[in-house]
Every structure is written in structure tokens, then in C-alpha cells.
Image (cartoon, helix red, strand yellow):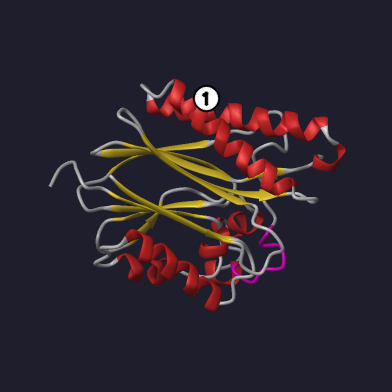
Amino acid sequence: MRFAGKTETGLRPQNEDCYLLMHTDTLDAVAVSDGMGGHQAGEVASKLAVDTLREMLLSNHADAEAALSSAFVEANNAVHSRASQFDEMYGMGCTLVAAILRDDEFIAANIGDSRLYHFDGESMHQITHDHSFVAELVRRGAITAEEAKTHPRRNLITRAIGTEKRVPADIFSCEWKRDDMLLLCSDGLCGVLDDSEMAMYLQNCTDLDAACAALIERAIAAGSRDNITVVLVKNDGGNE
């Protein structure tokens, strides 16, 4: 596997995004988290969620689906517990999207509206489902995906790490092959760029770091006012 990640504060006063690139002899995993909450509590929430996820996956990842599910439970417990202990952190939370990577498959999980995409060399496929007010409107056909980008309640999350004692994660198991790519991002990117535009930056991509930087630069030019985080993974093994 080849990995790259980049995060930018953008027009926000501080960066509340956090990401993970993890490579060991037995485990490849990636994650992105987007924090929310005042007094820098969002920054605390996203880092705590990613750190907890990392420690949980390191301790047990033989069964990838069970490991991700347990890691998300513990990440939620950690953020919810911290928020309950300090008045200035009350109500803090974060999104979390993560994947465990194998040569021929990836197992992903998410809570919130940070996304994971699979790029097969020709087209981009959103694997995760947003847990947001506007995503629900789109699913019901009440508004279009384009209208969702400017909807006044587009930032309303319906499911987030740490905001309740129990928050279920969606789990996805997908096949992929050599030279396929994954893109994980916060809504600072996918909230302003459509799937086809992001796919353009992955076509014939040879430098993952440069692609991350170019995507962020394009999101800023397109009007993103949020923190922007991008993680890219390229499958260098598996089936032809």
C-alpha cells in the first residue's frame, strides 16, 4: 500500500480535523475525523477519537469488521466520557471514517459526514453514507445533491462520535484490486467538489502527496471555508 495525507486549516481559526495513516507488519489502516464543539473542543474530540481508534486496532484486528466496530464503540466512549468531565467540552463530538486495508478488500466504517470513496481507475464511488440532515433529504428526493451543497442546514450532523452514549457505525466490506485508490476526506473537500472533479485528480496519479495538495488547493479555490483533510491510498498489491 502507498499512503498520503494532508490537512489544512483553511479559513477557520483552528484546525479541528485529524487523520491517521497506519502501517505495521500486520496492519494497514487509515482514518479521518472532523471535530465539532467550541473552545477548541472539536480539536480534542477528533484527536481523541483517532488516537483511541489507533490503539484499539493495534490491540486487535484479526477480524477486521469486528475490530472496526469495537474501535468505533471505544472511540465514542472516550469522547463522550471526556465531554462529560469538563464543562467547556460539553456537547463536543466528531465525525469518523476509517478503513482496514487488505490486498483484495477493504473494510470501512463511518459515523458522520466524512467520506470514503473508491476510485477504480475510471470512476469514483462513494462507499460511506453521510449521517446528515441534507443527506437524508437527498435520499428522500426532497433536494438534489447539488442543492445540498448550499442548503442552510448542510452542516447539521445526525450521528456523531461522542454526542450520545451509544452511536452505531455503518460497516462496509468491499473488494478492490491493484492500482485502485481510496480517498478519505472531511466535508471541507467533498462539500464543495463533486465526485467527477475529485476523480480528475486521481486519474494517472503518480504522486499521492501532490494529489492531496492539489485537491485541497482546488477546494479552497472553489470556496471551501472549512478545515480540509484528504487521505489517499493506492493499492500496490492484490489481484491484477
Point out the image quarter for the N terminus.
top left
Tell me which secondary structure the magenta stretch mostly adopts: loop
- Label 1 sits on a secondary structure element that is helix
Position of residue 180 relative to residue 152, above or below, is above
The location of residue 196, given as percent across then percent down, is 38, 70
Q: Residue furthest left?
A: 240
Residue 208 counted in the magenta span: no
Left or right of 203 in this view: 10:
right
- Residue of label 1: 70
Query: Where is residue 156, by image quadrant?
Result: bottom right
The location of residue 125, given as percent across then percent down, is 37, 56
Q: State the residue at coordinates (42%, 62%).
A: 212
Q: Characterize the local packing of mark 1: few (<14), some (14-19) or many (20 or more) Cα atoms within 10 angstroms.
A: some
**Is residue 149 in sight in this rendering?**
yes
Left or right of 216 in this view: 104:
left
Position of residue 157 relative to residue 226, above or below, is above
Position of residue 72 relative to residue 144, above or below, is above
Position of residue 4 relative to residue 149, above or below, is above
Q: Which residues are magenta?
A: 149-155
- Amino acid under disc 1: Ser
Total marks drawn? 1
Residue 154 counted in the magenta span: yes
Left or right of 175 in this view: 210:
right
Query: Where is residue 205, by image quadrant?
Result: bottom left
The location of residue 98, given as percent across then percent down, is 47, 41
**Is residue 230 in sight in this rendering?**
no
